[in-house]
Amino acid sequence: MFLNISLLILGFAALTFGAEGLVRGSASLAIRLSLTPLIIGLTVVSFGTSTPELVVSLFASLNHQADISIGNVVGSNMFNIGIILGLIAISTLKLR
């Protein structure tokens, strides 16, 4: 039990430091390439949200479990469409 909690805390710490490094690195890259922060921000967000799905699909395909890869893609797209439609519905209700 203690090991699981320790690994969870260690994982959150690694995730935090990794995300911070990614954001700082992308900001410095944007400055060097004379890009707008919006373009770099959208690119970082798109890579950041797609990387976990890529890793899961990669491990599933290496273990000959194509069903997991297909479910990952379909589930991700369903969630993305659902969350966007839900946010649009909430924003239109607040405007009335």
Image (tube, rainbow, N blue to C red):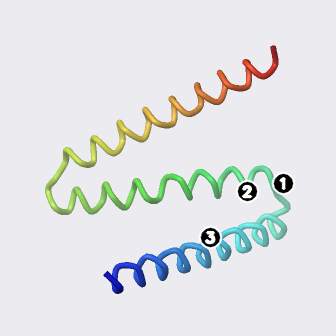
Pointer 1 with pointer 2, Cβ within 8 A: yes
**Figure quadrant of the N terminus:** bottom left
Residue positioned 54% across, 73% down in the render:
15
Mark 2 residue element: helix
The numbered mark, 2 or 3, whose residue comes first in the sequence reads: 3
Q: Quadrant of residue 27?
A: bottom right
Mark 3 residue element: helix
User: What amino acid is labelled 2 in the image?
Assistant: Ile
Q: CA distance from mark 1 to mark 2?
A: 7 Å
Residue found farthest to the left = 64
* Viewer-side label of 1, 3: 3
Per the image, the residue denoted by label 3 is: 19
Q: CA distance from mark 1 to mark 3?
A: 20 Å
User: What amino acid is labelled 1 in the image?
Assistant: Thr
Per the image, the residue denoted by label 1 is: 36
Can you say whether 18 is above or below 90 in the image?
Answer: below
User: What amino acid is labelled 3 in the image?
Assistant: Ala
Q: CA distance from mark 2 to mark 3?
A: 14 Å
